[in-house]
Amino acid sequence: MPFLGLLSSLVVAIILPIIILAIYLFIRPKGELTKCPHCNKNIHDVLTICPFCRKEAKRECLNCHEPVPWEANQCPFCKSRALTGKN
Ligand SMILES: [Zn+2]
Ligand SMILES: [Zn+2]
């Protein structure tokens, strides 16, 4: 039946891009990616704990308690230099 072959290839041509798009939308990160300072894997910027190595990916300001980027030397919010994980 040549009609069935045409129909199935038509279904594949329509369904397949939709599935790929759905998968892409599902795995697409919602937010900025940043690198874990410990294991160097890409993690979401909103995470304070790395899901791969379970270590803290961000410091916390001891003055205003905002999350601070790991590489920062001072808090970008209150300019305090008292951050966790530094000595
Ligand atoms: Zn990590
Ligand atoms: Zn602060």
Image (spheres, helix red, strand yellow):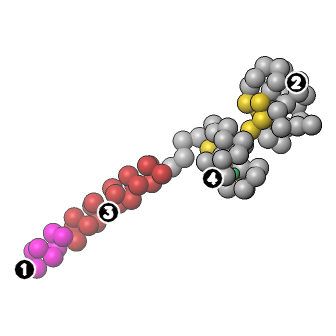
Q: 73 or 24: which is nearer to us?
A: 73
In the rendered image, which residue does mark 1 sit on?
Answer: 1
CA gap, disc 1 and disc 4: 52 Å
Q: CA distance from mark 4 to mark 2?
A: 30 Å
Earlier along the polypeptide chain: callout 3 or callout 4?
3
Secondary element at image label 4: loop
Label 3 or label 2, whichever comes before in sequence order: 3
Q: Nearer the viewer, mark 1 or mark 4?
A: 4
Name the residue nearer the viewer: 31 or 43: 43
Whole-angstrom CA distance, mark 3 to mark 2, is: 51 Å
Residue nearest the observer in this picture, 11 or 41 = 41
| Magenta region, residue range | 1-8
Quarter of the figure with the N terminus = bottom left
What amino acid type should be assigned to the residue bearing mark 1?
Met
From the top left corner, tell me how far across and down residue 16 is, in percent. Answer: 32, 63
- Which residue occupies 62% across, 44% down? 44
Query: Which secondary structure lies at badge 1?
Result: loop
Q: Is mark 2 within 8 Å of ligand 2?
A: yes
Answer whether residue 4 is magenta in the image: yes
Q: Residues within 10 Å of mark 3 (few under 14, many from 20)?
A: few
Residue denoted by label 4: 52
Task: Report how far apart the C-alphas of labels 1 and 2 lie in the structure.
Answer: 74 Å
Q: Secondary structure at mark 3?
A: helix
Q: Residue at the location (28% across, 66% down)?
A: 13
Which quadrant of the structure image shows residue 40? bottom right
Q: Is mark 4 within 8 Å of ligand 1?
A: yes
